[in-house]
Image (cartoon, rainbow, N blue to C red):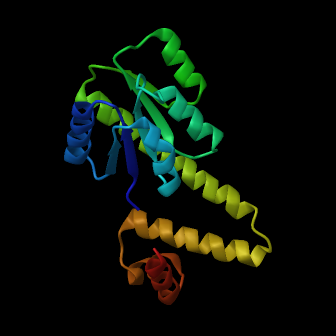
Amino acid sequence: MTQRILAVDDEGDMLRLMERIVRGKTSYEFDSCNNPMDVPELLAEKEYDLVITDLKMPGMDGLDILRHIREEERQEIVIVITAYGSLDSALEAIQLGAFNFITKPFKKDYLLDTIHRAMEHQKASRTAQRFRDLLQTRPFDDALASFKHEYISHALRSTQTDPGQLARDTGLSEELIRRVKEDE
């Protein structure tokens, strides 16, 4: 599944720059929004892995967006970007749960590295949550079936092997592996 980014900035030029950087160097889906007041509605419509937001914007600033994500108990990771960086605003963003705080002007490679680290963190968090949920599954036979599905999904994503080879490698039936692959 392709990971998704929502970038929020009231400056169109900054959004276009971030889009060029992300689309040119990654396979992440990229949506942008130049009106921060639209963010709650966008988040209600679609799940994102990462929100990159400017700090200072009219109506709803980056900290307001971060608060909204936390209050709604959403899973998006947030990176705050600002030209008005101060230690106090950086500390507040981090205390509210921001993954990172980047000051403008930023280097393209630094932005990309931060995005990649955030996405890896997000993948690990979501995997851990799936396994926490799996451990709560009752009865055991349902948990075992769910674990097999998760195991096969992970193996298919990480090894890029065909179902026949995966069946030989794991001892699971090729039919089961094909069913899981069709579910993906």
Looking at the image, the residue that sits furthest to the bottom is: 175
Note whether residue 10 is visible: yes
For the N terminus, which image quadrant? bottom left
**Residue 107 position within the rendered picture, expressed as x and y whole percent measured from the top left:** 25, 25
Q: Which residue occupies 64% across, 58% down?
A: 131
Residue 123 visible here: no
Front residue of 50 and 167: 50
**Quadrant the C terminus occupies:** bottom left
**36 and 19: which is toward the camera:** 36
Q: Is residue 110 above or below residue 20?
A: above
Q: Position of residue 96 (x, y in %)?
A: 59, 27
Above/below status of 92 relative to 159: above
Q: Position of residue 33 (x, y in %)?
A: 35, 42
- Residue 128 located left or right of residue 45: right
Left or right of 17, for residue 144: right
Locate residue 6: give its quadrant: top left
Left or right of 51, for residue 23:
left
The residue sitting at 49% across, 89% down in the picture is 175
Taking depth in this image into account, of 160 and 21 the one nearest to the observer is 21
How many circles with numbers are drawn on the protein?
0
Identify which residue is drawn at 46% across, 43% down: 39
Q: Position of residue 114 (x, y in %)?
A: 37, 33
User: Residue at (37%, 58%) from the top-left corner?
Assistant: 2
The single residue placed furthest to the right in the displayed view is 139
